[in-house]
Amino acid sequence: MADYLGNTDGRNLHIGIVVAQFNDLITQKLLAGAQAALQRSGVSAADITTWWVPGAFELPRAAKQMGASANVDGIIALGAVIRGETSHYDYVCSETARGLAQVSLEGPVPVMFGVLTTDTLEQAINRAGGKGGNKGADCAAAVLEMIHLPH
Ligand SMILES: Nc1c(NC[C@H](O)[C@H](O)[C@H](O)CO)[nH]c(=O)[nH]c1=O
Ligand SMILES: CC(=O)[C@@H](O)COP(=O)(O)O
C-alpha cells in the first residue's frame, strides 16, 4: 500500500509543503504530521520540499510559485490563523482560502488547504496532533488521493 501511494507510473512522488511561520508552535506540529504521514505512505523525505513564509496570507503566492518552479506532484499548504481582537482574522482566513483554492484550480498541481482557522489556541492545539487529530496528516492523505485521480 505504501509503495502505491508513494509513487506513480513507476517514479517517486515529489510533494511540496508551504508552511506559515506565524503561530509556529502550531504550524511546526502540522508540518511534522504531514511529513510523518507522507513517509508512512512511501514518500521519501528527500522528495519533500518545504518552504516557509511569514504568515497564512503569503501561502497562496508561495503555492503558486512552488507549483510553477519546484517540480512537485502536489502541494500541502499549512497555517494556523487564530482570532484576535479585530476583523483582521476574517480577511486573512477568507483571502488565504480563496487564494489557495484559486491556485489549486488554475495551477498545474492539487493544493491542499491545511490552514487551521480557530477562535482559540486550544482549538488549534487540538487539531495539530491533539484530540482533534492532525490537519497536516489529513492533508498528506488528501494530496496523495488527488494525485492518483484519473487524469
Ligand atoms: N494573525 C495571523 C496572521 N497574520 C499575518 C498574515 O498572515 C500576513 O503574514 C501579514 O498580514 C502580512 O501580509 N497570519 C497567520 O498565519 N496566523 C494568524 O493568526
Ligand atoms: C488572525 C489575525 O490576524 C489576528 O491574530 C490579529 O490579531 P488582532 O485582530 O488582535 O490584531
Image (cartoon, rainbow, N blue to C red):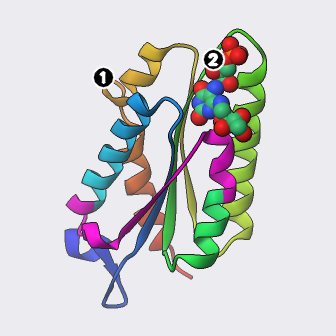
Q: Residues within 10 Å of mark 2 (few under 14, many from 20)?
A: some
> Mark 1 or mark 2, which is nearer the start of the sequence?
2
User: Closest to the observer: 124 or 21?
Assistant: 21
Q: Which residues are magenta?
A: 39-61
Q: Residue at x 28, y 72 (%)?
A: 46
**Please, is residue 128 above or below residue 56 in the view?**
above
Measured as percent of width and height from the top left, residue 2 is found at 21, 68
Which residue in the protein does label 2 denote?
Answer: 83
Indicate the amino acid at tag 1.
Lys
Residue 84 appears in the figure:
yes
User: Closest to the observer: 100 or 66?
Assistant: 66
Measured as percent of width and height from the top left, residue 140 is found at 39, 55
Quadrant hosting ligand 1: top right
Mark 1 C-beta to ligand 1 under 8 Å: no
Which residue in the protein does label 1 denote?
Answer: 131
Mark 2 C-beta to ligand 2 under 8 Å: yes
| 3D distance between C-alphas at marks 2 and 1 | 20 Å
Q: Quadrant of residue 112?
A: bottom right
